[in-house]
Image (tube, helix red, strand yellow):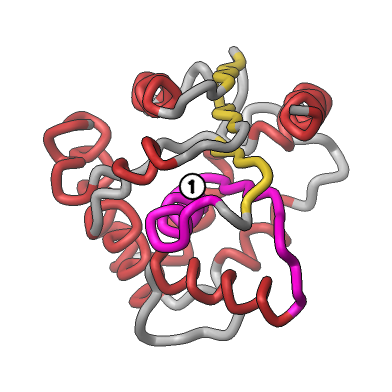
């Protein structure tokens, strides 16, 4: 994506995706949102419903509660907000720590250095805006009750947001919940076979 200085929000990214699908004449597609991408998926559903969606997957992140996040997930919110000064003052070091902390058992062929270098391409002012808008800007939980497509909620059982993911799955009619022990945030890297099998089950529904 280009580096845009404004409108770095799930709502705008959902509109961008809608435009791309329309231009390519794609009438139905699977939506898979990892981490903050879960909010992009929810923003899409809130604005456009599910008519162009065949299945959905929320990967290792609940949908944000907006300003209520501070009360809904108190400990997580405190930890998150306490780390922002480090991001602003030392973005390179913060980004490296953040990337390295995501993985529990990365495969030997994964070039962590390349992932860190790629993550550093986002200017801190844009990254900070995205983080705040994605998590604390809008309550996207109302999208969950609108979902009427096969849905997978998958993540690490060790995540500090595992309980929030359970509540999210409960709010989606018929959603499959899969929380796996001993994984980091990118479950598709730490346990690619388990992730692929879960997606295959989703696609068969």
Side of 79 where 19 appears, left or right: right
In percent of width and height, residue 110 lies at 80, 46
| Residue at x 54% of width, y 24% of height | 175
Q: Quadrant of the C terminus?
A: top right
| Residue at x 27% of width, y 33% of height | 76
In percent of width and height, residue 88 lies at 30, 67
Q: Nearer the viewer, residue 180 or 102?
A: 180
Side of 84 where 173 appears, left or right: right
In percent of width and height, residue 201 lies at 77, 24
Q: Nearer the viewer, residue 158 or 166?
A: 166
Instruction: Say whether residue 127 is magenta.
Output: no
Q: Where does label 1 land, which residue?
A: 38
176 vs 61: above or below: above
Instruction: Say whether residue 46 is magenta.
Output: yes
Q: For the view shown, which residue lies furthest in the top direction?
A: 181
Label 1 secondary element:
helix
112 vs 145: above or below: below
Counting every numbered tag in the picture gives: 1
Q: Quadrant of the N terminus?
A: bottom right
158 vs 101: above or below: above
For label 1, the crowd category at 10 Å Cα-Cα, with few meaning under 14, some 14 to 19 and many 20 or more, is many
| Residue at x 31% of width, y 70% of height | 129
| Residue at x 58% of width, y 27% of height | 154
Q: Nearer the viewer, residue 72 or 52?
A: 52
Magenta stretch: give its range. 24-50
């Amino acid at each position: 994506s280009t580096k845009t200085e404004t409108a770095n929000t799930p709502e705008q990214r959902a509109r961008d995706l809608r435009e791309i699908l329309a231009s390519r004449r794609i009438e139905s597609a699977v939506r898979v949102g990892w981490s903050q991408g879960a909010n992009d998926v929810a923003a899409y559903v809130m604005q456009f419903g599910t008519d162009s969606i065949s299945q959905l997957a929320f990967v290792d992140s609940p949908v944000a509660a907006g300003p209520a996040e501070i009360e809904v997930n108190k400990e997580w919110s405190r930890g998150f907000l306490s780390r922002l000064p480090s991001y602003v003052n030392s973005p390179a070091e913060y980004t490296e720590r953040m990337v390295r902390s995501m993985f529990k058992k990365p495969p030997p062929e994964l070039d962590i250095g390349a992932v860190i270098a790629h993550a550093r391409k986002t200017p801190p002012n844009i990254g900070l805006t995205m983080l705040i808008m994605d998590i604390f800007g809008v309550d996207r939980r109302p999208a969950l009750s609108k979902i009427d497509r096969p849905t997978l909620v998958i993540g690490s059982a060790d995540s500090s947001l595992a309980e929030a993911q359970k509540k999210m799955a409960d709010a989606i009619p018929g959603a499959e919940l899969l929380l796996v022990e001993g994984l980091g945030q990118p479950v598709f890297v730490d346990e690619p076979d388990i992730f692929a099998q879960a997606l295959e089950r989703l696609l068969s529904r």
